[in-house]
Every structure is written in C-alpha cells, then in structure tokens.
Amino acid sequence: MERDPIRLSWRSSRGPNLGIAFVGLLLAGAVFLFLFVLATLIDDVVIGGRFAGADARVPFLRLSFGLPRVLGGGSIVLSEGIPLGRDLYLTAAVATLLALILLQVALRALVALLAAAVSRRAANGLRQDMFRRIVTARPSAQDEAETAARQIGEGVGRLAPALGEALAVPLAAGAEIVVIHVFGFVQHLWIGLLFLGGAIAAAALMRPLQEARAAAGLVARENNREAGRMAEETARRLPAIRVHGTGQAEFGAFNAMLARQSGRLAAGARRHVARQALVAVVRYGLPALFIVIAGNLAAERVLTPGAFVAGLFAAFLMLRPVDAVMRWLSGQYDGRAALEEMARAVGSLNARADRRERSARLPQSTPQRISVEGLAAFDAHTGQRLEGVDIALDLPAHIALVGPPGSGTDVFAAVLAGALDPAAGRVLVDGVDLRDMSDDYRASVIAYAGAEPVMLDGSLRENLTYGAPPELTRDSEAWDDRLIASLKLVGVDAEVYSLGLNGAVGTHAAARLAPFIADARRAVRTELASAGIEDLVDPFAAERYNRHGTVAENILFGVPVGDTFEERRLARNPFLRAVLEAEELTRPLADMGLAIATQMVEMFAGIPDDNALVERFAFFSAEERGRYESLIARRVQRRRNEQAGDRDLLIALALRYVETRHRLGLLDEALEARILAARRTFARLLPPGLAPAIEFWDPERLCSAASLSDNLLFGRVAYDIAGAEERVHAAVRRVLASLDLDAEVLRLGLSARVGPRKGLASPVPERLVDLVRCLAREPGVLVVSHIFEGMTRAGAEALIDRLHRGLDGRSLIAVLPPGLPEDCLDRTVRFSRTGLVQPQAEADMIEGS
C-alpha cells in the first residue's frame, strides 16, 4: 500500500494534477504580468516620464529584459507592445490590472476545484482498495478486517484534504513564489536576494509556529479531559466524601491540578507568542527592509518608481504562498503518518490473506462427493474446535450432524460451507479444494445458513436478494416466484402475507391491482354477507360518519401521503385548523381533548411509563404523558392561562378518538354532523399545492397510500364486537385466494420495509430470512446450522421435514438441535466432545431415516 501522499495523489489522479500544473503556470504568468503592468503604469503614466508631449505615444505591454554584462549586455525583446496615447494607455493599463486580478481569482478557484476532484478520487480509490481487501479477507481475519474498516471512514476522511493538496499547493503556490523571485531578480540582484532571504526566514519560522500552535491545542485538550475525569471521579466518590469529610481535600487536589495545568498552558502560550512575534517581525520587517534597500536604489536611479511600488506589492504578496507551502508541509507530514497507520492495518489484513489463485470450478454443476482430509479447525468466537477429522460424503444426500453441545458440529458445518478456514487439512469437493474456489462461485454451489444473520435497512425483497448472483435477479417476476417458493418451504409465507396485506400498496403495485380493485371489493362484501358478518365492517361513505374511524379519519376521508397530514402533525396543520375554525369545531374538539386527557391522567396515575397498559390503552405516548399531566395540573390549580401549544395537544387527542373503541360518550349525532361538514369543507377548499399530500377514498379507485386490506374492506372493522377483526380478515383471505391474488399479496409483502428494527426483527425470523436467501439461489448443497435456535421442538421438526421433502435431488447437511430424532434425514454423522465418532463400517455411518 502506498505510504506517500504525493505519489498516491499522482497515481490516482494524473489528469487533474496535470491540469493543476497547467493552471499553476497560468497563475504564475498572471502574477508576473500584474506586477509588470503595475510597474509600467506608474513609470509611464503616474510619473509620466515617457509622455513628454500631448501627442506622444508609448508602446503598451512592451516586454523585454536586459542581459548581464557577462552575456554581452543589451536586452531581449519579447513583445514590442501596442503604441497608445496617454489617456488610452491609462485606461488600458487599469483595465488590464483589473482583468489580471479577476483572472488570478478564477485560476485560484479552478485550482481549488481540481484539488477537490483529486481529493475525492484519491480518497475513493484508497477506500475501494481497502474495502476490496476487507471483502476478500479470510473469515478468520475478522478482527483485522474490523481494524481496517475503522480507517475507511474518518481515517480516510481526515487524510483526504492532504491528498488533494499533495501536488496542488507546490504546483500553484510554488509557482507563485518562483515567479515573484524571478520578478525581484529582474528588477535588481539585491531585490531578488531580499525576497529569497525573506522566504527562507518565513519558512524557517512558520513551521515552529505551527508546531507550537498544535502543541498548545493538544495541551488544552488534555487539560480539559483531565479536569473532566477528575470531576467525574469526585462525583462518583460523593458518598465517601460525605462519610469521611474529605471535601476540602478533594477541592485542594482539584486546585493543585488546575495550577499544574495553568503552568503547562502558560509555558505553551509563551512559546507560541514568541514564535508568533518572530513571524510578525519577518512579515512586517520584509516590506520595511525592502523600502530601505529599494529606496536607496531608486534614489540612485537604479530602480524606477514603478519597480519600487511593484516590488513592495510583491513583498507583501509573497508571504501568502510561503505560508500555504508551510501548512502544506505540515499536512503532508500528518498525511504520511496517517497512511503509515492505514498501511499497518492493511498489512495485518494482508498477512492473514489467502494468496492462492481462487478460480477453480467443479467438473459438473452439482457436487457428487465431499472429502474431508485431516481437518482441524477452531472457531475463535465460540471456542469450539475440531481435530483429526477424516470423512467422505457421497452426494446428493441429506445428512444430519449430531452431537452434544461443544462437540464441533457447528464448526464442521462452517468449514464445509467455506465460512471458516481450516487450521489444518483440507475439504475437497469433487477433488477441488474448497479454498481454490472464489467466494461467489462457492456460495452458488454450497450455500450456508448459519452465520450471524444480516438484515439490511431496505425492503424484504432486497434483504432476500442479498448474495444472489445478478443472472438470477434480471427477471424480477421469476425471481419473485423463487422467493415465494422459498418462503413457503421455510414456512414464513404467512408472516410475509400479513406484511403484504397490512402494508401500504404503493404506486408500483397499484398499477397491477387497480384494474380489478372494484370487483375485489364487491367480492369481499359478498363474502362477508354470505358468512353473516357484513355488519362487522362499517363501509366508507362520503355523506356518513364512520363510527369505527377516528375523528381525524372522518375529517380527511382519505390517507395522508407524506408527513403533511400525518397524525402526529395534524393538530398543528394550518389548513386543518382553518377548516376547524370555519366550522366552529376548534372549541368543541379542544373540550373533547380536555375530557379525554383528564380521564387518561386519572386512569393511569401511578402506572409507570414503560407499562404495557400505557402504550396499549392511553391516547398519548409515554413521551407525551408529562405534557398532558402538566396541562391538567394547571387546570386543577385554576391557572387558566393557556400555554403555547396547549390547544394543539388537546385537539390532537380529540382527533384520535373512536367512540366505539374508547366509549367515553363524547360524540353525539350533532357533533358527527359538524365533523361531516368539516369533511366537505376540507375537500372543497384543499389548495392545489396540498392535493398530493392526501389520497381521498373513492369506491371505484384503489388508494395506493392505504393497505391492501383497507382497500378491499373499504371501511373500518367494528371495535365493539369480539373476534371481529379475525373473522373479517379470514374472509378477505378467502376472497384473495379465490381470485388467485395470493402471489400478489406476497409480492406486496416482499416490498415491505424491514431492517434491524423493522418488520422481521426477532432472531428466529432473521435466521429464517437467511435460510430463504440460500434456498432461493437453489444451490447444489445447503448447509444449515443455528437456524433452529429459539424454535419449539414441533417447529424444528416441521422445518427439517419441509427441507427434507423440498430439497429432493439436492444435498442438505443440517446440524440438528438436541431433542430432534437423529434419523430424521438419510444419513447421520455423529460427533463427540473429542471429535468425529468414527464408524466401524460404512453401514454404521449410514442410517436409513
């Protein structure tokens, strides 16, 4: 791995760095030309020495330089210039100076943009190189991979600026320094030497100044940490301080620590101020010394007034690029140290890497034999080990690995699947060493469900597709069919079906379901009527209040899209509040909310926030509870003045109210009629800009923002009848099955968002999702381990039976949990705590199930 920021920057971004070099040359030329034009402007126009007469014409931008006597004297003319009169000369010179200033600004901006591009390319290239080493590392190098992974984020991020400046600063700022020195030597030898000495002095002093500044900052940070640690430790000792009366002693020790810190800070500040003073001497002394030397030369008419002024400007101008170069040197030093640290991390990873060629293929697509020779392996995470394992397994077969806890069955399964490297020996698949196969090819031949399950933040489909080769997923419909078949084989199709039934349809699925949603709704109503449960669903109707819907649902008569009209923000929505004011509902809803809050606060007084009753039956969440208690307390104490937001809180409670569910007697027919009037006003006055934020219910159209279940029922299930929801949903499932829509529901479930804290988040489903991933790839050999953890015995037996029947013609190697019959598969391989139980004969190893 490259350890030099300059070489790394050049190798990763040759084109942009060449562009920086070209722009640097242009910048240097612009600086030189600016100084030259400034000098000629003063000499020719301000002093006016060359415009003797009113009609005199002087060449503008005549470029020439004299040769020293040793070279024969004389001068070389680069440009004869353009003859101009005095007024036109002045205008052209001023315009040129302004143009050169703008050009310098533009060129410096271009250098910054190119440096940023170099920084991005170099940082991304470095991250790609490190990431590639991580994903190709051996499983046993996980600790080294984690160390390298920590460097990819903030480590490379801190290094990125140094990589961008690696060549940009010397090429741009360095060019400026060179051209300023050239200008000085062109004017006079002493001027050039003065510039050179000033640059050397500034460079010699700026580096110690930067080091002193960094050291002072480090001391300050260490002092802050020390003071914080001492205060925290004292706080932890507070009971002992009170018991033993050591408060004054603790205070004295803290003061002594502060005194030591003050001494260190003062010493660092003195060093910093002293070096800063020396830099200031150079910064302001260089122009002063230039005035003395150049003034004498001008008095002797060796130096023109224009050259004097331009040289003074150059003296001030030179310090900026010198300072930039010194900061660059410090950044490169830190960058080299950072690259060294990354190289050590990657070196540890490389030391554990498998350097063999990994491109072997099997002679046929389906493995016929697995041979294990002299296998020894150790799992550092579980502490289990295997030694001296020799066995041959003829395939296809369904093989059970059994043994007491700690016997090594899980280690053996991991080694067979390539998830764990052998410490000794080898695993041959049809004569090919497993370690000679690439990871992606091995995973397509031998799939392993047993590692720590990985759940991504994305759809369930994206999670199940993790690890699938691209050729399998190009046809999305066929891939979904594979996933659905695997879900059914594993037995989690019911959970995915529920996700699809209760999750939002979405615009993508709406296009497929929309043509027959009206017929499906009618079929559901017919099924409910035939089952005698039609009264369990209160249908949506534009002119009727839905008794099983919330007040908010009855006002909106639709489903929010986005967060504009979502429940937690609805009470503060300006448009809704305007509608409530127009229909004179603000006060009635606030009173309803106050009644609800009063009863809820009294009902749950003394019950902790984390109690399940609060989350299940209270109108407000545990986070909101304190605000409502404070509101009620102010009312009880007759502090009638409302605080900002009190009315919003009360209306928010009222909007969540369902009479048939909460049964507080707060809704009557008159109030329902006024809420229906608000519904009509809301729909009639909704601004066009807010129209995309809600999707209204329509009996002939599908609502993509609602769930499929709500779309089919087109109403709300009764809250006041026991078992209503289960009976209604059973009827919906029967209708979907009769319409051959079960696959569509499962596809909706595959589109549901899941992740570490979403959907299938418990350990058992995650392991089963990992199993589905493997089954969908249809490997020749499936190795399973740990997937039965957390299952009942009946559930584990049912799963192993489904896998046994579903993988007919393919191989299954399963680590059985304790309690399952050992003869549930075709073969049984037994392990003891000392290793493999060697059979006396082939018949002892093969047991018919």
Image (cartoon, rainbow, N blue to C red):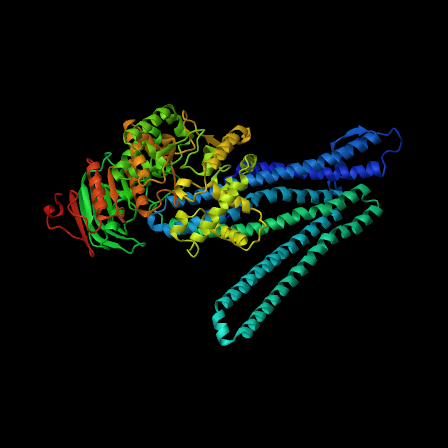
Q: Is residue 848 visible?
A: yes
Return the x and y of residue 513 as percentages of the image width and height: 37, 27
| Relative side of 708 to 106, left or right | left
Count the numbered circles shown: 0
Q: Nearer the viewer, residue 612 or 727?
A: 727
| Relative side of 167 to 369, left or right | right
Residue at the farthest right position:
53
- Quarter that holds the C terminus: top left
Q: Quadrant of residue 780?
A: top left
Q: Nearer the viewer, residue 807 or 26?
A: 807
Q: Nearer the viewer, residue 454 or 14?
A: 454
Relative height, residue 548 to residue 162 (above, below): above
Residue at the location (46% across, 44% down)?
127
| Relative side of 546 to 230, left or right | left
Return the x and y of residue 453 as percentages of the image width and height: 33, 45
Residue at the location (49% across, 45% down)?
593
Q: Nearer the viewer, residue 206 or 142?
A: 142
